[in-house]
Every structure is written in structure tokens, then in C-alpha cells.
Image (tube, grey):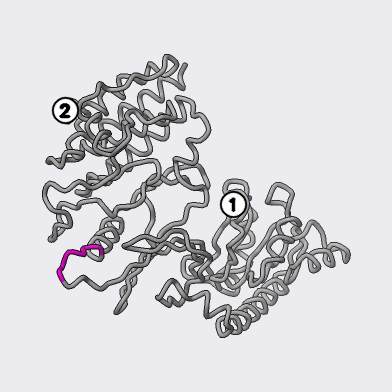
Amino acid sequence: MRLLMIDHDPRYRALIRHHVTCRWPDADVVTYNPVRRGPMAPEFLAQGFDAVLLDHASPQGAGFSWLEDLGARPGFAPVVFFAPDDEIRTRERAIEAGAFDTFSRDAIDNTRLLDALERAAGAHVDALAEWRGSPEGLEALQFGAARLRGYRRVRELARGSVSELYLAESEEAGDLVVLKVTHTARKANGVDQSFDRFLQEYEIVRRLRHPNVVRIHDLGVMDEFAFIVMEYFAGGDLRKRMRSPLTLRSALGYALEIARALAAVHEAGVRHRDLKPGNVMVRDDGTLALIDFGLAKHEALAFEITDTGMIFGTPHYMSPEQGHGQAADERSDLYSLGVVFYEMLTRTKPYDADNPMAIIYLHAKAPVPRLPKEFARAQPIIDRLMAKDPAARYASASEAAAILEMALETLEGQ
């Protein structure tokens, strides 16, 4: 039995879990805290769960509104609703709103609850089987030319020359995910290394277990296609967050999270090489996660995916050495962090020009930019992160994180 419980109260969750494990000792009860995570993504149908348990008291008193929303979603898992009482009118209202069954929140009949969950699970299995055999269900398994079972395609997010990105619902993960699909075929001349780069990205992130690094759920390789299943960020990326002015405290906090992620990445022998706001995602709880390791280089990998002297990355965020195709180490990522930190504070890029090569030249030759007066206390950090000479930067991401943490603590202590 696998259940999704929408509730913010740990004591009530423990009570319901106790009821459920009386019949199913190994039941998996996954929690969705609406107070912390906010509204449930409209594309989510909870298809990977046998049933959904919704506490009317949890979504800040909006339980019936949540029930109406979930009950109106075609294909959503059966919802068992814990109502404020067991009055006939309350039960009728819950059933009309889409509940599979309803119980008084404070007077639960254990046997009736478990029987209702068993019936809900059976009804959900039947409904899913019917849906999967329908034209709509078969179409939802299609991700470009690849057909992937266990995933429901919601929509295409992006399409490039190397891979395609889709928003999907994973039955196994029980959540919305991002599916990245690429061809496994190589070009006859051997120039196309996109599949090697694709596998490298998976191998890199699989080894990294850090709260500020994207989570990878799965990898699949077929005859013509390969796919990676990754964490989905409904809140978008850091650039979206930067559309509104950030305080120094917020920018320091975000820079600290990025530095900690880089420290973990570098400790694993990886250089990111494409750090920019679009590759830093925001989770529901406001924390950040570093994504897109497609250009990253792992020191332990047997194959080299870029030729010496070739330039990869985004010019606005490149270190001088990376922009000129010179040898670069972990301190190149720190330079990019400095650029991102500067942009968080000023909402402008430190260097801009009409063409990429001019931007690269400015990174190498122009003075380190000055912050506005209100952010002047952060200028020493910018000076170190964006130093032209790598030797003048912080020696490591861990050292940068320690400095950022100290600056944040000093600010909060004032």
C-alpha cells in the first residue's frame, strides 16, 4: 500500500500511519506538507499512489477547496477525506467535491478506514488499466520518438540539437519529474559526442548527494534512445527569482548555497563549467539546487569530451581563462559564482557587449566591477571571486562558503 498524505501536523500523520500499518505493516505513507510546499502542481495526478489522504484542517483551513481542486482533475488518485465532523451534510459535501470516502477527523473507525483504502486502491488499479489502454493513455507514454512506460508526459519543456526535455509524472517517484531524452546513435565520423556527454552528466550527478545539487531518479538506455529522470522545480530558476530586487541578506544566502554545492561538486572531482542563474533552480521550500552538468568535466572519467582549446560555457559568466580556452580548475567556477553574486545584487551583468568575443575580452581585461554603495560591504567578496588571476581568488569553494557564511552571520547579527 502506497499512500500520499496531505497534512502539516506530524502528530496526526503519525496517527494515520498507525491506523494504516495495522493492516499493511510495510505501507509507504509519503507526506505532502501544504503549509511548507504550497499548492500542489496542477499537472500532478498522484498516479503512483494507491490513494491520497487529505486532512481538511491542514491546508490552512482550505481542505474543501483542495478537495474540489483534486477531485476535478481527471485521472487523479482516489481521495480519502478527513472532515471536521461526521455529519451527513458534511459527508455529502465531501463526496460531491470528489472524495472517494470521508471520515470524521477526530473519530476514525479503523476497520472502515482500512476497508475504504483497500477499495480505493482496487478502483485506482482498474482506472489506470483502462486509461493506459486508451488512445489518450498511449499518447501520454510518448516522449518524442521514445515510448516510456511508468511515466505520463505532461508537456514538452525544451527541444535542442542534442536532447529534449519533458515535464512528466513518474509513478515510481510519485512526483512530477523532468525527463531528458537523447539519441544513442553516433555520427559516422565520430564527431557527435552528445551521448557520451549525456552519460557523463548522469554519472556525475548520481555520485553527488548534496541538498544543493539536483536529484537524479533514474537512467534508461534503449536501442535508439537514452533518458535521465531528474527532479522538477516548479518554482523555476534563480533568474526568475532575480526579477525582483534581492536584499544583501538574500543574495548572500543564495551565494552561500551555491558555494556549498560547488564545494561538494569539486570534492567529487568535478568542475561545473557552466554556472549561471539559469542553472540554479529554486525548490518549493526556497532552497537552491545546481543543475545541468552537461558541460562538466569529471577528472576520473576515461574519455575526454572536449578538445583542448575549445570554449564551452556562457560568455557572460566565463572566467578569463575559460573564455580564452586556457587551462582551468575549480577556481574558474568561483569566478562564475562571483558574476552571479554581482548580478543578484545589481540585477545587471558585470560586463556586456555586442558579441560574445567582446564579452570574453572584458572578463579578461576590464577592472572588477564596483557594487552600488548600499552593497559596498560585499565588494571584498566580489574582488576575490572575480579576480582576473585564479591565484588571487579563494583557494576553494569551501573557503568561499566559509567567507560567505561569516558575512551572512555578521549581517544578521546587526
Residue assigned mark 2? 389
Q: Nearer the viewer, residue 234 or 6?
A: 234
Q: Which image quadrant is residue 252 in?
A: top left
State the extent of the magenta-drawn residues as a range: 189-194
Position of 184 with respect to 230 (left or right) is: left
Question: What's the residue at 46%, 42% (across, down)?
Answer: 287
* Residue under the point 40% across and 75% down: 146
Dot 2 falls on a residue whose secondary structure is loop
Image coordinates of residue 194 in percent, x first then y, are 25, 63
Q: What is the magenta segment's predominant secondary structure?
A: loop
Q: Is residue 229 magenta?
A: no
Task: Please indicate whether residue 73 sits to the left or right of residue 357 in the image.
Answer: right
Figure check: 387 above or below 147: above
Left or right of 252 on screen, residue 22 = right
Q: Position of residue 16 (x, y in %)?
A: 64, 62
Amino acid type of the residue that numbered disc 2 sits on in the rendered structure? Asp
The disc labelled 1 sits on which kind of residue? Asn
Earlier in the chain: of badge 1 and badge 2, it is: 1
Vertical position of residue 142 compared to residue 267: above or below: below
Of helix, strand and loop, which one carries label 1? Answer: loop
State which quarter of the image contains the N terminus: bottom right
Is residue 192 highlighted in magenta?
yes
Task: Name the mark on residue 25.
Answer: none
Q: Are marks 1 and 2 in contact (CB under 8 Å)?
A: no
Residue bearing mark 1: 33
* 172 or 235, nearer to the observer: 235
